Amino acid sequence: MKVVVFQDNKVLLVRRADNGLWTLPAGIIDPGEEPSLTAAREVLEETGVSCEVTDLIGVGVTAPTVYPNGDHAQYLDIVFRARHVSGQAKINDDENLEVGYFDLADRPKLPPLHERALAWALDPRPGGYFA
């Protein structure tokens, strides 16, 4: 799941500790948790920002994964749009090295699925994006 959080025409990004890449806040649903609640929780945990999830933007899939035991899997990629409610963007966990809001024109390059999520959020369509 990815969350595109906007504040004053800027987008919230994190630089991941595991690979050094800039991405949108993202995470995995806990058992029994609703997806929009996961989105808000992940943003708060990673960035210290409280947000209001406003829209389900789209649903896609991640790249296929092959596990060491030979199992093949592919996961849903749910994309939400949100607005900043309160809090200062900061490193709020051990998963990220940097956190901040960026002007869209001056932001770091994002991995492909994060670029797709941002593009969807910038040009939402009725019914969302899905294949």
Image: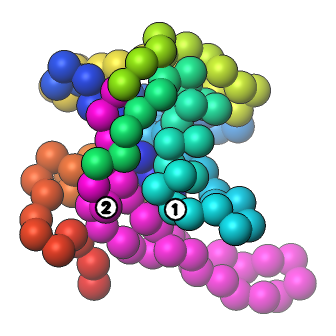
19 relative position to 57: left or right? right
Q: What residue is shown at x 47% (from left), y 15% (from top)?
A: 87
x and y percentages locating residue 131 in the rendered image? 28, 84
Of the numbered discs 1 and 2, the one sitting upstream in the chain is 1
**Separation of marks 1 and 2 at Cα, in angstroms:** 10 Å
x and y percentages locating residue 63 in the rendered image? 52, 72
Looking at the picture, does residue 126 appear above or below residue 70?
Answer: above
Main secondary structure found in the magenta portion: strand
79 relative position to 97: left or right? left
Secondary structure beneath dot 1 equals: helix
Label 2 CA crowd tier, 10 Å (few <14, some 14–19, many 20+)? some
x and y percentages locating residue 83 in the rendered image? 30, 34
The answer to whether residue 52 of the structure is visible from this angle is: yes
33 relative position to 122: left or right? right
Secondary structure beneath dot 2 equals: strand
Three-letter residue code for mark 1: Pro
Front in this rendered view, residue 22 or 125: 125
Q: Which label was assigned to residue 43?
A: none
Residue at mark 1: 35
Q: What residue is shown at x 82% (from left), y 88% (from top)?
A: 70
The answer to whether residue 83 is magenta is yes
Q: Which residue appears farthest toward the right when viewing the image?
A: 69
Residue at mark 2: 56
Q: Quadrant of residue 67?
A: bottom right
Residue stretch rendered in magenta on the structure: 55-84
x and y percentages locating residue 60 in the rendered image? 38, 73
The answer to whether residue 14 is magenta is no
The answer to whether residue 117 of the structure is visible from this angle is: no
Label 1 CA crowd tier, 10 Å (few <14, some 14–19, many 20+)? some
Three-letter residue code for mark 2: Leu
Front in this rendered view, residue 14 or 7: 7
The reply to whether the C-beta atoms of the residues labelled 1 and 2 are less than 8 Å apart is yes
